[in-house]
Image: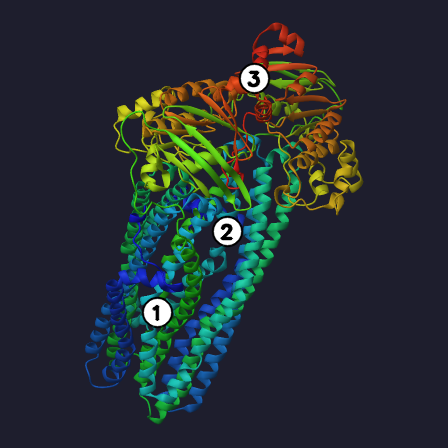
Amino acid sequence: MADAEPRIRAKGRWGLLTATLSEQRRNLIIGTVIGLAWMAGKVAVPRLVGLGIDRGIEGDDNVWMWAGFIACAGVIVGFFTAFRRFYAFREARWTETKLRERLFGHIMSLHVGYHDRAQTGQLMSRSSSDLQQIQQFVVMIPITASNLAMILVVTVILVITNPFLALVALAPLPFVNWAGRRFSHSIHPAVQAVQAEQAELATVVEESIGGIRVVKGFGAEQVQADKLSKEADDIRRVSIEAARIRAKFLPAIELLPQIGLIAVLGVGGIQVIEGDLTLGQLVQFNFYVALLVAPLRMLGMAIAWGQRAAAAIERVNEVLDTVPTVSDATDPTTLPTGTGLGAVSFGNLDFGYAPELPVLTGFELELEAGQSIALVGGTGSGKSTVARLLIRFYDVDAGSIQIDGVDIRDLTLHELRQAVGIVFEDTLLFHDSVSANIAFAHPDTDQATVESAARLAGAHDFIMGLPDAYDTRLGERGYSLSGGQRQRIAIARAILADPRVLVLDDATSAVDPSKEHEIRSAMSTVMDGRTTIVIAHRPGTIALADRVALLDGGRVAAIGTHDELLATDQRYRDVLAAMDRPDDASVPAGSSPDGGAD
Amino acid sequence: MWAMNAIDEDDRLDTDEARQVIRRAARMAAPFKRTVMAAIGFSSITTLGLLLGPVIVKYGIDSGIRQLDRGVVRNAVIMYICVVAAAYLASRQQYVFINRAGEGFLRLLRVRVFGHMQKQSLAFFDRNKSGVLVARMTADIESMAELVQWGLLQFVGAGLLVTFSFILLLVLSWQLTIVALLVFPVLVIAARKFQRDSNAAYLDVREQVGQNLSTLQEGIAGVRVIQAYAREPEQVRRFETSNRGLYQSHIHSLRVSTWFFGLVEAAGIIASALAIGIGGWLVNRGDVSIGTVIAVVLLLAQLFEPVQQLSQLYNTVQSSAASLSKLFGILDTTPDLLDGKQVLPAAGAVTVAGVGFRYPETEAKVLDDVSISVADGERLAVVGSTGSGKSTLAKLMARLYDPTDGTITFGGVDLRDATLASLRDRVVVVPQEGYLFGGTIADNVRVARAAATDAEVSKALAAIGALDRFEQFEDGIHTEVRERGSRLSAGERQLVSLARAALVDPAVLVLDEATSNLDPGTEAVVEQALESLMNGRTTIVVAHRLSTIQRADRIAVIDAGELVELGSHDELLALDGRYTKLATAWASSQPS
């Protein structure tokens, strides 16, 4: 897995970004050079306009020559404006794209224990909105560089032309920046207030729609409508409050530069009368002041975006800095090959999801090749945990698990997980065709093999009845199957993987009891001659296995056939009775980390 | 635009549709007409203020500087200050007024859409995913906020700026106006092309974003399966493909749009060049003053930015129109459960006669020709396997849906002819899970009757034997239940739900028995509460438990939408039919 991810260890907060950006050094430099060319063109225009007025209109030069120069500068500026934008955005998108791939690769390599704690939504926003913020900041890098250069060059030109007028004209401009910062500062709480009110309205909407049966059943529509109307009023109130803040600052930010222009007219006008300044220079000043407004505003934004990007980078780093705790052996061995293999031995295991809560203590179990065993136990007995340890979703705290005499930690994860197949309780299907879902383990498998796996799993018939048969797309956005159908596809997926050890983790729990027998026959086909661990609640499913191990207190409390245990063991009868209430067809899924101790 | 609801939504509106949507929105905004007019008025003052600057500069140059008159320069400065101050004040007001109108409109939209949504029958909520409906009320409406806050103003401001600029140009010098007329149309044509291309590219980017997000989500949600099958490299490759697709669509969007920004810049500067060229020639001929040329150059410098802003605004307008059109779609859905005129009698039998039911837009009948009469005070259990139609039958009896065929009557009155208010008083459905809203326990009981006093709420809780339990809480029945009632246990939530029914004190109770079990402690309390609630009432219970079934007067067995057996427990066992089979299935899955 580690090979999918280039190792650039980030140093410090910005390390990740600088490392990524240094890969794009060349294009960033080109972008900056283009930005400087743009700047030169922009700065030339007011000077040319000033000269055009002084020498072309007022003087004896041909005015069309100066007009021509200005037009040329216009073409150059236009050209580089487009290029500057293109380069800046392209590089920023590339940074975002690369970072997202790194992040995804890393997320895929992180151990299951990490995923138990992390929420999908959080990882999603790391990979989307956080990277988006970083992208916005990266766009600003070359743009800000040329903006800064422009501010500097224009200031120098103005000071050289006429220091006093420069001072008067530029004096209001820092206030644009200052007002911008004041504005961000005061609008922030107002925007948060709006968001908070929007969230409250969303709660009312979610509640009303989620509880629509209650609302309808009691005719409580008006009650909910009143609640909503109150929230809508609140949103309006705080939004108008926020608008007042905008009304205070935005016009000021927009009009402040006008004060510079007034100063140029007043002070510069007198200077022209006194002969210290030409009319062209006056206009030139006017243009330069106007030219500085946009870069100054952008500078304020760049600072704000930089701050947001810094926070985003920190969050992204947190994920990337997490080292997978379950990883390949440094010097991996391989499993023996041949026939009659698949013996599994659990030797004296200790394990707990948290140190203070042991789930397994001194767990011992031997499975001969080709033998099947059902693990039975109450909630929290650790039966699902055994399966998860076998495919190294977690590593044991003490003891060892061996397959055909090899400690599973001495194998590569890839080899181990090819050797052990698991059918989960909650069947996850991907947004892909039925065939691709079945051929998940070996995407290059031919169609005939896919179909024979589906037949063995008892899935072929209903698949042929789907709109596009094997090409029907499944998953969240695809065709929705019933619990039993999904389960059979998952079994077909395991059959096609052809593992030497198979784990069926509560594979029938989502299935209507009246349909369970259909899956049972699929299960017994796969189990035939294969080492299988069955985790089950229902007697019919348990009976499929050669032997039954009763788990209690983190170890095997009794072992034997279903009938033997029924006849001899009171605890076994109690556990079955507790688990199998007649109407309790669907026990809520226990796949969450906290419920995972099952 | 990274919101999850971006996935799968069609945001493409053609021009006609967009126009219709905007026209309809304008009609809906009619109450805010005066406020909008005020905003436009202030916006005009602001724009005019901005444009007067160059004119004042002209005055200062021609009458002051050229005439070496310091007094005029001073006057020009004072005028300029006054104009800017007026523009500032007007600009503040335009923000206030447009937001007042805009937020008022959004408020109206929220209230109306929600009200209309709630008028729909359950079939509407079955048809539309709840996430989508929530998105309509939140993300779709919120997406318009940007437009309200500054977009509309920019739109109006830019339009005014262009109009006023041309008027001023004409006043200053008709010859120099030609300069603007030479450049402006080129820009307008370019802007239209930009809009078309960039909007198509923008929608494409949105689609790719959605696709990439779902690939991402699938990978993260499916990480256990992926790792179990050691398929990480394939998944990473799969993600890379979609991620690169997104990158390419970003680049495409950049490519079709970026030239426009260059063009606007170039056009502005070239216009200045033309103004200086033509202006210089006119000055030499003595047709215009130098001040006029400078004023025109300054005016032209302001003229081209709005074009760029407007073009960028287009995407925002487009997606707001798409949001609006979806919201109007909801407003256009006619509620299919209409109020009747007759008040239901206080008591009577519930009679189902020849009832068939098909969910809208589906072929298969869920129920077919079912007839049962439940006598006043009788307790009927409805049983059957998953998907047999038993829950649908119960819902029809409470008129959560209307039957496709046949009639359901209470005390001889067809439920469709009854007023909804009297219907909800006589017949109450208690759903499987106790669903709680935000607020206190009392608030939650009061969902059944908003006007109920605290005493009545307490009485209802006492009637089902739950009052003592809740009064032990620190704030008693005024305890906040927190989000989705997380403060309460599942059993307690169920008790609140039953208390609602007790508050209404209906003649008929329709129960959908919970499939999942409660903790043993509360289970007994809930069962007792149920028992006291059912006492003396006509009860129709969709049953899952043998104990409930055995306590019923009669049992209706539904299979594949048909009533196959009806009778008491013993009678049905004697038949040795469907019921016997179901009963044996329950027994066999029980340990021996």
* Res B373 → quadrant: top right
Q: Tag 2, which chain?
A: B
| Picture colour scheme | rainbow
> What is the secondary structure assignment of the residue under circle 2?
helix
Give the residue type that dot 1 points to: Thr
In terms of sequence position, does the residue under pointer 3 or pointer 1 come before the other? Answer: 1
> Which three-letter amino acid code belongs to the residue tagged 2?
Glu
Whole-angstrom CA distance, mark 1 to mark 2, is 31 Å
Chain of the residue under the numbered disc 1 shown in the image:
A
Q: Is residue B86 left or right of residue A280?
A: right
Query: Residues under labels 3 and 1: Cα distance?
Result: 81 Å
Residue A231 image point, x, y percent: 61, 50
The extreme bottom residue here reads: A274
Which residue was labeled with disc 2?
A: B142
Place residue A244 in its image quadrant. bottom right
Label 3: how many residues lie within 10 Å, few (<14), some (14-19) or many (20+)? Answer: few
Which residue is identified by label 1?
A: A144
Mark 3 secondary-structure assignment: helix
- Depth check, mark 3 against mark 2: the one in front is 3
Query: Residue A183: horizontal and vertical position, in percent?
Result: 50, 68
Task: Give the percent coordinates (x, y) of residue B510.
Answer: 66, 25
Q: Nearer the viewer, residue A560 or A132?
A: A560
Q: Nearer the viewer, residue B67 or B549?
A: B549
In the image, B567 versus B528, the foreground residue is B528
Tell which of B128 and B213 is nearer to you. B213
10 Å neighbourhood of mark 2: few (<14), some, or many (≥20)? some
Q: Which of label 1 and label 2 is nearer to you?
A: 1
Task: Write down the residue under mark 3.
Answer: A567
Q: Tell me the quadrant of the picture where the C terminus of chain B can be found.
A: top right
User: From where the camera sits, is residue B186 visible?
Assistant: no
